[in-house]
Amino acid sequence: MNRIDHHIRISQLIAKEVNFGLDESERQELNAWINNSEENQIAYERIRNQEEFLNWDENFHQVNVDEGWERFEKALTPSRVKFAFQTIFRYAAVLFVPLFLAGVAYYLYDDLSKQTSYQNIARIDVKKPEAQLILADGQKVSLCNKGISALKEKDGTQIEKGEGRLKYQAGNDKRTLLYNTVRIPKGSEYELVLADGTKVHLNAMSSLKFPIQFIGKTRGVELTGEAYFEVSKDAKHPFVIDVMGTKVEVLGTSFNVKAYKEDENVVTTLVEGSVKVRSSGFKAKTMMLEPGQQAVVSEKSGAIKMQNVDVNLFTSWREGVFLFKDERIEDIMTELSRWYDLKVFYKNQSIKEYRFGGHFNRNSEIGSIMEMFELTRKVDVEINGQTIVIGEK
């Protein structure tokens, strides 16, 4: 067991000790870690002696999750915060039970952050990237077919197919605007490099319609679902994304757009550069975003709400991580169902409003994730194949 595996295991043992108690073998395992060093003893005592942890179950609904999250971030330098999100969050398969496991992670974090070699935790055979490419003539190509490494459109555009990735190289015929479409099923993701060099990372249950080479004054594409864009700069040809009528216009920048068909909003989160978001309808509105800002467009009214956000919460999926902060369990399960192909039912409506925060690897087994929810003592989870039923404890 590598060191990060061991620390995650210890945090789970401490969480179980507080909530349920340990059996004899688990008690011996935890004691062995405690007695291994003075630093471990101090860390354990600090965790167990904290009143907020000892009384955690009684005070569950009074916990200030925002305050706890901010304290966790302030304990690290900016470079280490970035390291945490990009490296440890990519591999750790621990769900933060507010605030208990957050506290455990806080005290063990300094040792964890010094590691330079990691392995995935709680691996399962998540579906490998598989997608469907629809060519300009309507031909459908399975992108999980390893026998295909290159394609060619009738205008001469070359399409290179790699592992989970397509790359377009424009042809010489610029007389006709030809479109391709990529569709991503549940449990998969895919990356495109468009003819202008723009990179598009498509999330599960998403599709993108795009010209195989850009002709005209704008570079226009159509998105359904979620994608992270890294747009190639071209001041003379703005890049415009049509998302359910909402237009997101950029010159060169990095941002995330989320708008699944069942959602009521188009959510644009800006990481770098600037974007202009324009809603549709009679009362269309326009808003400019700066890095760290998010525009939420109501599909029904066209109203735009702007807010400052932690962009990691909305872009971590492309790093192979689910990351949630004080989210409704219904919203969390909606995200999980797109990846794990689940059907989720609730025994009563009030459960949908329960709020949780956490992070875990997208290769984690769904059973281990649901087990962490049960550790909160607030919900009971039944798993039957791809069906999950959630009730109150």
Image (tube, grey):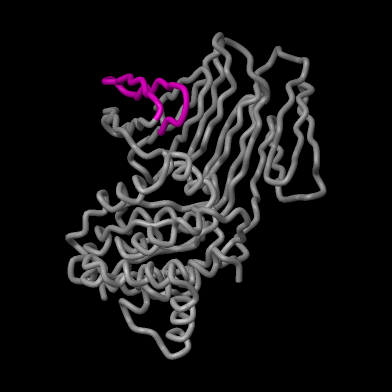
102 to 134, vertically: above or below: below
Instruction: Give whichever of 206, 202 is nearer the camera.
Output: 202
Question: In the rendered view, would you say 333 is above or below 368?
Answer: above
Tell me if residue 290 is in the magenta stretch: yes
**Residue 142 appears anywhere in the view:** no
**Front-lying residue, 122 or 306:** 122
Place of residue 388 in the rendered image (x, y in percent of width and height, measured from the top left)? 41, 69
For the point 43% across and 91% down, the residue is 24
Q: Which residues are magenta?
A: 269-291
Residue 77 painted magenta: no
**Where is the C terminus found, in terms of image quarters?**
bottom left
Q: Residue at x 56, y 41 (%)?
A: 202
Q: Is residue 386 left or right of residue 393?
A: right
Left or right side of 149 for 133: left
Q: Residue 106 location in percent, x, y?
A: 38, 58
Residue shown at 24% from the left, 58% from the top: 353
Residue at 38%, 67% in the rendered image: 43
The number of numbered discs placed on residues in the rendered structure image is 0
Closer to the camera, 326 or 181?
Answer: 326
Q: Is residue 107 left or right of residue 163?
A: left
